[in-house]
């Protein structure tokens, strides 16, 4: 049977999506793979289909016991024999599965990493001794192995031993969320052999991205929910306390809402999640504990009441909207105070290197919230994907931005940065441009040609322009003791008058945040 035939016979689909075909062919030829595909992109098929075609057992490593059952049930319905082994099963059930494995009656076996490698590798040894050998190992949510990822799970580190036990078995690592650093870490930790890396487009064209300055967020939320009473949505809050409070407040307003966070007992969590999946409850108010592996297609909106800690998490959370391809919204309420508050959350005691990485990811997130340019472009570029300057479906693109020839403004800003020897932050550069009477500036820099050439432009406008010039790549922040503005490879052309720069006319930015980056 060819992959395309199997696709039709077992899964009922006529065409492959994204890079599915290439991934599957690579696995079938015995190679290791790392596949990045957006949530809902169809990752499972990339190992389930080879599992059907390969002679032998496919082991699937998955982080959440709760998710295994769903996957296994739907495989069995499709006529593909699958099972899971976990602590929720009785010894009888477990031995039935062991018997089936011995007689080659199972094609896919789902396991948590600690199950595979626990009890002195007993299960590993058993699986290696099967009459029909293991033919493929799939690692779902592979970013969980990386400290740099946004959902590190220590038990995933046990998978570092995988290649020692199964040296010649193709391994396929799958994730919907890994930036460059996390990707590298996954490959290294799993010790993959000459892996082929497949990165599908992460663009979720049916999701509109919006960021609103946070003022009175409950009223703002009610405004947003106004015409959405019958639609399904997820609302994320940072703390368990605010999750509970918001669920109560929404119910008081007549909304169908339930809470979900890791502090609730298992029965409540399961009940609320089930009710949401069945559409009995429209809104789930949750911490980020909610959502991994949730396969609900008609989520119409995802709201973040607080800023997430990094783009990876944000993109995965917003990606839970619109899996059915219909128009959906992602809305985030941003206050610079949130970013500052999160600084202490992301710091990791005794690990300055990791703290630094986390802070820089937090900074990228804060930057996203203050973008004067297309949000989709920023998100896609974050994951190293090219994108056009305007997507037409984020708040920035939708605010009918009018631009003007800002070349002269750009030249002033760039030449100020140059004359100040790329040693100062935004505030100082602006004070210098505006000819501030500040003692230090006057004493040290007032003789410089550019001093005071930007008097006619307000501080707030200068802040926007500089942010925009950074977003457009004509200036950048370089970390010293604090972030200083420096030139880029694109600066020279502007300074020499070879490059025209269009800037956003400021009157359309009234709704936008005016604060500078918090750190
Ligand atoms: P992911 O794990 O990447 O979030 P899933 O593997 O759960 O996504 O797939 C999402 C949905 O897309 C599932 O309902 C799946 O059956 C469906 N799907 C996967 N591949 C295809 C395909 N080639 N054609 C149509 N639907 C597909
Ligand atoms: Zn856009």
Image: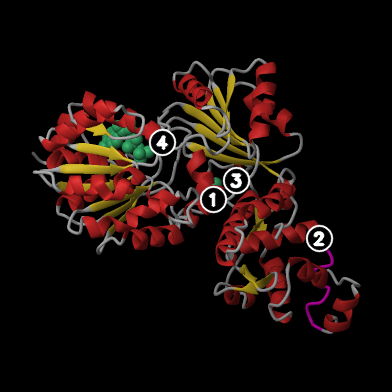
Location of residue 309 with respect to 475 vertically, above or below: above
- Does the magenta segment cover residue 453? yes
- Crowding around mark 3 (Cα neighbors within 10 Å: few <14, some 14 to 19, many 20+) is many
Q: Does the image show residue 361?
A: yes
Q: In the figure, residue 45 lies in which quadrant?
A: top left
Numbered range of the magenta stretch: 448-456
Mark 3–mark 2 Cα distance, whole angstroms, equals: 29 Å
Quadrant of the frame with the N terminus: top left
Cβ at disc 4 under 8 Å from ligand 1: yes
Q: Position of residue 423 (x, y in %)?
A: 71, 77
Q: Nearer the viewer, mark 1 or mark 2?
A: 1
For this view, does 431 lie left or right of residue 414? right
Residue at image mark 1: 311
- Residue 506, image x, y percentages: 73, 52
The relative height of residue 513 versus residue 517 in the rendered view (above or below) is: above
- Label 1 to label 4, Cα distance in Å? 18 Å
Whole-angstrom CA distance, mark 1 to mark 2, is 29 Å
Disc 4: which residue:
293
Nearest the eye: 486 or 280: 280
Q: Secondary structure at mark 4?
A: loop
Q: Which residue, given by chain and number where applicable, does mark 3 sit on?
A: 308
């Amino acid at each position: 049977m060819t992959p395309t035939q199997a696709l039709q016979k077992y899964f009922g689909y006529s065409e492959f999506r994204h890079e599915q075909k290439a991934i599957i062919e690579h696995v079938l030829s015995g190679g290791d793979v790392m596949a990045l595909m957006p949530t809902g992109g169809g990752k499972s098929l990339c190992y389930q289909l080879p599992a059907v075609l390969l002679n032998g057992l496919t082991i699937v490593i998955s982080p959440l016991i709760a998710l295994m059952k769903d996957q296994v049930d739907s495989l069995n319905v499709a006529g593909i024999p699958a099972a899971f082994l976990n602590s929720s099963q009785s010894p009888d059930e477990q031995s039935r599965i062991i018997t089936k494995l011995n007689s080659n009656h199972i094609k896919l076996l789902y396991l948590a990493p600690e199950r595979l490698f626990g009890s002195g590798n007993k299960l590993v040894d058993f699986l290696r001794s099967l009459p029909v050998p293991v033919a493929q190992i799939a690692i779902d949510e592979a970013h969980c192995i990386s400290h740099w990822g946004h959902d590190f799970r220590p038990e995933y580190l046990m998978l570092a031993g995988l290649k020692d036990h199964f040296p010649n078995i193709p391994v396929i690592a799958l994730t919907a969320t890994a930036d460059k650093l996390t990707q590298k870490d996954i490959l290294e930790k799993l010790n993959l052999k000459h892996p082929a890396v497949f990165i599908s487009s992460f663009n979720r064209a049916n999701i509109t991205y919006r960021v609103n300055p946070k003022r009175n967020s409950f009223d703002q939320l009610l405004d947003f929910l106004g015409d959405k009473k019958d639609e399904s949505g997820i609302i994320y809050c940072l703390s368990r306390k605010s999750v509970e409070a918001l669920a109560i407040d929404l119910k008081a307003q007549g909304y169908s809402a339930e809470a979900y966070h890791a502090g609730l007992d298992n029965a409540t969590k399961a009940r609320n999640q089930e009710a949401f999946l069945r559409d009995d409850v429209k809104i789930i108010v949750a911490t980020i504990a909610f959502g991994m592996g949730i396969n609900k297609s008609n989520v119409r909106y995802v709201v973040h009441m607080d800023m997430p800690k990094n783009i990876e998490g944000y993109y995965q959370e917003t990606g839970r909207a619109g899996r059915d391809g219909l128009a959906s919204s992602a809305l985030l309420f941003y206050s610079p105070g949130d970013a500052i508050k999160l600084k202490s959350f992301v710091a990791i005691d005794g690990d300055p290197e990791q703290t630094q990485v986390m802070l820089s990811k937090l900074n990228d997130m804060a930057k996203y919230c203050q973008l004067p340019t297309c949000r989709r472009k920023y998100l896609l570029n974050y994951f190293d994907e090219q994108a056009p300057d305007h997507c037409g479906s984020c708040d920035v693109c939708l605010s009918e931005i009018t631009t003007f020839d800002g070349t002269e403004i750009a030249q002033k800003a760039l030449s100020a940065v140059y004359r100040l020897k790329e040693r100062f932050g935004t505030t100082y550069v602006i004070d210098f441009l505006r000819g501030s009477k500040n003692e230090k500036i006057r004493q040290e820099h007032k003789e410089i040609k550019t001093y005071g050439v930007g008097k006619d432009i307000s501080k707030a406008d200068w802040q926007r322009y500089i942010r925009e010039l950074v977003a457009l790549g004509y200036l950048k922040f370089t970390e010293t003791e604090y972030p200083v503005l420096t030139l880029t490879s694109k600066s020279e052309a502007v300074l020499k008058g070879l490059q025209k720069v269009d800037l956003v006319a400021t009157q359309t930015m009234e709704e936008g945040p005016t604060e500078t980056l918090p750190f």
